[in-house]
Structure formats: structure tokens, C-alpha cells
Amino acid sequence: MHVARIRSSHVDKQGRRRDYESRYLRRTYRDGATVRHETLANLSGLPEEVTDAIEAALKGTRLVPAGEAMTIARSVPHGHVAAVHAIAAGLGLPALLGPAGRQRDLALALVISRVVAPASKLSTSTWWADTTLGADLGIAGATTDEIYAAMDWLAGRQDAIEAALAARHLAPGVNPQRMALFDLSSSWVEGRCCPLAARGYSRDGKKGKAQIEYGLLTDPHGRPVAVRVFPGNTADPQSFTEAVTVVREKFGLEQMVMAGDRGMITAARIDALRELQGAGWLTALRAPAIKKLAEDGGPLQLSLSGQQYLAEITSPDYPGERLIVCRNPLQAAERTRKREDLLAATENLLAPIAARVRAAKLAGASEIGVAAGKVIGKYKMAKHFDVEITDTSLAITRKQDQIDAEAALDGFYVLRTSIPADHLDAPGVVTAYKNLAYLERDFRHIKADDPGLRPIYHHLEERVKAHVLICMLACYLTWHLRRAWAPLTFTDEEPPANPVAPARRSARAHAKASAQHDELGHPYRSF
């Protein structure tokens, strides 16, 4: 028996052609020398899938229920690595790393793993086999020796990778303001054999640990472009000097504005930048310099209030530079509150000592001075108190005039830049400086939130640099992931229009937080 399919067509009076298929269940047999066909049933009225099933069964195909067609022997997670891998491919990250080959596949897998599940290299190599990433890139059975070889290969390509990123994000065509952001951070090192490890100022609060320092260079939007690793005792200005060298010599960008905080771009660094043709800067003034500008006859007038949050001034102390004065009223109120709390806390510490002196339980100017000296500087408020000590008395009074003078500058900060006004207006200068917050965010992501850079267990100098480079590339990938997935998360997609005014969430961000779901009912999530 078999299913016979007979196709025919018909043209009606209007000239329209119609095609038909008739399906019959037939038995074919031989009658002597003649082959005969017997129609057993007309199947044309049955659904086509039923006819197909009958035909398959007659041909000897064994049909089983769909739920019993297969059994799952092993299933590995796929969605997270597939999503990150797709974004990486869309960014051209594989080609950016280098020519195709096993070492590039391993390097790409290390970057993706830093985004999804940061861990040690040994743990990462085991994890590859537990996801589809290992099979997709063909690196499921990679050994630790192969991984370390891939890291060495990647470290050798660092200059080429960073040059390509600089051409992509810092070139004049895509960065007309010619702005680059730079900042420094540190992470502690485990072990005693790393030549880069040294004791210095720990930004992680690990005072008993040796550390390395690394400087991160980004575009104006906080996209990582380059990273440099320094010994743990390197000063900020020295690292900044190397960053300028990288921008000019390795990236070939002669016209570039470097933005950094007031501890990074010092007066000495600015003097050095003046000697470089085409090099500009954007930074902030320290508190003593702001105080000098606000003195009698100075250009800084303490009248920025209400809705006026910024003004542009000039000063003979900063020839050829623009000074942008900004005031944040919420910050001013917070600093006033905090100062008052610290003054009151200092007075509370001194009150028991004064009571002991009055009760003659503590006497002698030296003894009283030692007791008061132990507590008066605890909250760094000693500068605001007059202390009079005799053998039998302790008098403490506030320097109210000095306190009022300091309070008058609460909420003020002053930016200094060499960028001409026709290239960047005053609000643009403030926005560019505030974009340094992107660097702080990148450091949080690199060190703790996402790629998990710290602590560092590598001992060889090149391996440490390769490890930091992998984390930087993972941060670059995370930057684009956060941007691509912003509509799916609680991310505020509408930054405030006024760069100086107190930051407030947009109406859309509030709607996300309150609704918890989009128009189609899909839930919003954190990144």
C-alpha cells in the first residue's frame, strides 16, 4: 500500500488558474503480467499532516509521540554567553584582538568570561565546558598552559588593540571635541614575587598589602580605550605624563584635551602641557585656589544662587585659561549640615575633659593639652576652634568668622580649561568634567562589579598586564551591553539637561521603577 498524489489544474472562464492535489490510499498488486492499482480510500479531505503521517508509516518510518522522540542526556546554559558573544561579534571584537586562530579564540573567551563569570584562569577553563561557549569557540578542552600562552599573545598585541580603539573612539571624526578622560586606581596583589607590586596609597583600603596601579584612558562617554599598569608606588602626575605620551606618540593624536581630577593634573603637569603643541587640559581648582579667587576684589562673586548655577570668569593668575564657576545648592546644604555635625561631635569629645578640669581632676597645662590634643583632631575640626589652656582651665570657643567664611564657599567648585569657548561652551565644560564619573563607574565595574580584577594572583609582569588588559576589554564590552540593554533595565536613559543642577531621575525612569513592567508585560531588571 502507498499514498498516491495526483496533481491537476483547471482554468476557469475568467482565466484564473487553480491547482489541485488529490491524495489516495492505494494497493498495488500484480495480476499476471499486469500491474493493477486499487483505491482503498480518498485521503484528500484529511489534513495534510495526517496524510504525511500515513505515508511515512507505510514507508516503514517509526512514528513516536513528540515527547518521547528524544531524551536529554545533558543540557548546558546558553543564553548568557550567547548574548555577550553576539554583542562582542557585533562590535568586531574578535577582529580587534588579532588574526583568527586558537589563541584569539582563547583570548576572546577570557574576555567574555570576565563579563559573565569572573574567576581564576583555572576555574574559567573548567567553566567553559559547562556552557555552550566552550563548544562555540572550540576551547572546551583548553589547558592552563594554553590559556597563559594566549594571555602572552594578547599582551603582545596590546598596542595594536588600543590604537584601533583610539581610531574608533578618539579620532577627530567621532570625537570633534578631542576630549579624553584619564584616571588612576589600584588593586592589591597576593604573593611576594610580582615585580610591579609595591606599597603605596591603597584606593582599596588594603594598607597592609602590596599593590599595582593602573591608569584608564576613555573617550568622553567613558568607553575604555587604553590602560597602563604601573608599580604600586607610582605618583598620579607621573602616570598622567605617560598617558599623554601614549595619546600623542602611540595613537598619533596631536590635538587632544586631557581631562582629569585636581590631583591628577597639577600645576606642574599643566606647565608641561603648555609646551606641547595642540595639548589641552580640563581640571578643577583646589580649595585654597578657590578661596583666593573669592577674596575681596577677586573675580569670584558669591552670588550664584537660585536658578543660576554657573558662570564664566577670568583671572590674571590663569592667563589664557577659562574658569567656570559652579554651585550645587544641595551639595552646599549637605556640607553645611555635615560641618555642623562634626563641630558638635568635636565639642562632645572635649566636654568631658573640660568637666574634669573644672572638677580639679585634671590639672597642669601640659596634661590638659595632651588630653585635649588626643580628641580635638579626630574629626579634622581643630582648625575651627580656639583653645586656651592654663594650669587650671580649658576654654574652647568656635572661630565663627572662619566657619562662616568657609560656609560661604560651600557647594562651589571651579573648573579650569584651555579649551576655547567656540569649541566648548561653559555647560559643555561642566558636562565633560562630570563625565569623569564614568571613569569611577568603570573602576567599580573592573575591580568588583563585573570583570573582578582584584585581587591579582599573577606574578609575571607581562601576565599582570595581560590580566588588566582583559579586564579593560571586558569593561569595554560591558559598556556596550549596558547601553544596548538600557530599555530592558531600570537605567535612566535621559540624563539631566542642566549639568550643574542637582541630578534628578527622569519621568521615564520613575515610570520604570513604579510600573516594573514594559508595555508588553515584560519585567524590567537590573543589569
Image: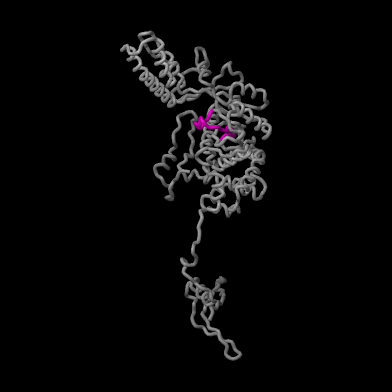
Q: In front: 1, or 159?
A: 159
Location of residue 456 in the rendering, given as x and y in whole percent from the top left corner: 56, 38
Q: In which quarter of the image is residue 263?
A: top right
Q: Is 19 left, or right, of 276 in this rendering?
A: left
Q: Which residue lies furthest to the left in this view?
A: 359
Q: In front: 227, or 453?
A: 453
Q: For the magenta stretch, what is the residue range? A: 201-221
Taking 173 as reference, is 117 above or below it? below
Number of numbered discs overlaid on the protein picture: 0
Type of colouring? one colour
Q: Is 479 left, or right, of 411 in this rendering?
A: right
Location of residue 513 in the rendering, given as x and y in whole percent from the top left corner: 41, 41
Q: Which residue lies furthest to the bottom in this view?
A: 32
User: Any magenta on residue 107?
Assistant: no
Residue at coordinates 42% horizontally, 42% vertically from top-left?
512
Q: In front: 203, or 384?
A: 203
Residue at coordinates 49% horizontally, 43% vertically from top-left?
486
Location of residue 315 in the rendering, given as x and y in whole percent from the top left corner: 56, 17
**Which secondary structure is most common in the magenta stretch?**
loop
Does the rendering let one see residue 379? yes
Q: Is 334 left, or right, of 461 in this rendering?
A: left
User: Any magenta on residue 203?
Assistant: yes
Does the rendering let one see residue 174? no
Taking 309 as reference, is 134 above or below it? below
Location of residue 381 in the rendering, given as x and y in whole percent from the top left corner: 43, 19
Taking 264 as reference, is 442 above or below it? below
